[in-house]
Each structure stands twice: as C-alpha cells, then as structure tokens.
Amino acid sequence: MLKKRNIHDSHTLFELMIHPEVFPFVRQKASSYEEYVFITKQTIEAEEQGKLISRTITDEWGSPIGTINLFDIEDNSGFLGTWIGKPYHGKGYNKLAKDAFFNELFLDLGIETVWMRIRKENVRSKKAAEKLPYCLKVNNLRPAIYRKLNPSPQEEIFDLYEIPKDLFLLHLKRMDHNEDFPALEA
C-alpha cells in the first residue's frame, strides 16, 4: 500500500499527477517529467534530513497511484499532502493510504499531530477528510493556525483539519475491539 519514494516511479506518477482533476490540488507541482524527477530527488533528500516524510501510494499489485506526505514538520507535527491519480478515485485507496501512513507516523516516527489544509472549493478532499472518524475540522478551535493559513479574513482559502495521535489510536482500539466481538445477527 505504501513504499518509500523512488525515482523509478516518477514516470507513472507524473502522468497521473498532470490530470486536470488532480493537478490543481497537488502541493509539489511539476510542469514537465524532468522537473518531476528533480522534485522527487529533492523530496528523497529532504526526508533523509528529517524535513518531511513522503511515501508512494500503491495499488494491490504494487503499481504507484499517488503520493502521501507530511510537510513542514515542526514540534512533532506537520501538514499532510496527499494526491491519488484520477483512475483510482472513489475506490477506497485514500482511506487505506491514510490509515497506513498515520500508523507509521504515530506509532513508529513520533508524530503527535497531523494537520490538513484543504482548499474550501476542493469538495472531494473535504468529504474524504470528514469521513475519517479520527479527523476534526478545527477552523474555530485553532484560530492561530487557521489565520496563518488564511491571513486575509476577506479571502479565506483553506479549511483546517486536525488528526491528533490519541484520537487515531482510539480509532485503532475500537477497530480491534470490533474485530474481537463481531456483530451477531438476531
């Protein structure tokens, strides 16, 4: 489902990223294949320096279908950036990728909070975030961070979401508990 970033996946990922329904919402945009390879190399180096965490999302056959990243890491928190190629939209990959990535971030890498800034017009991403049982919309609860993302009150561009480690771990416990005690039919 997730693997470390690799230059060899660049061609497939670039072709998926440039789709008009994907490209506007990608943080690390590239207008050419060569530029995408350069950005991928920079991403791999930045991860080695502890500046970000980046993974390639794969389908069940190991083919690359998108990326998931934690940017701007500071004080054991960072901002999530995820994109999945158009042919894979609506097939459940987003939730699977996020669950696997959050597992790694919270349980293995010491991250405490994941933030998501989602453009208000990006309805697909907002719906996906709001489906996650461990994700909170915190525009009013975290005003300092919200104002940093939207410095002009006349033009608010982003909604702010928070995924705290404890809420994610509670979700995992509930999932384990539900598997231990499956619902019985009457």
Image (spheres, grey):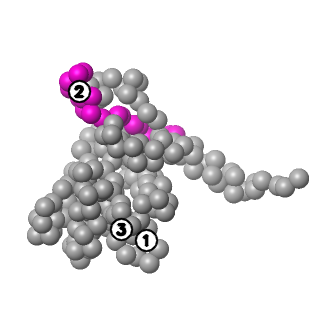
Look at mark 1 in the image and give the residue it sits on.
59
Q: Residue at x 49, y 63 (%)?
A: 91
- Regarding residue 158, the answer to whether it shows in the image is yes
- The residue stretch that appears in magenta: 148-167
Query: Which sits earlier in the primary sequence, circle 3 or circle 2?
Result: 3
Q: Residue at x 46, y 35 (%)?
A: 136
User: 7 above or below 73?
Assistant: below
Q: Amino acid at mark 2?
A: Glu
Q: CA distance from mark 1 to mark 2?
A: 38 Å
Q: Amino acid at mark 3?
A: Ile
Q: Residue at x 78, y 53 (%)?
A: 183
Look at mark 2 in the image and give the residue it sits on.
155
What secondary structure is marked by label 1? loop
Q: Which mark is residue 19?
A: none
Within 10 Å of disc 3 (Cα), the crowding (few <14, some 14-19, many 20+) is many
Query: Which sits earlier in the primary sequence, circle 1 or circle 3?
Result: 1
What secondary structure is marked by label 2? loop
What secondary structure is marked by label 3? strand
Q: CA distance from mark 1 to mark 3?
A: 6 Å
Look at mark 3 in the image and give the residue it sits on.
65
Within 10 Å of disc 1 (Cα), the crowding (few <14, some 14-19, many 20+) is some
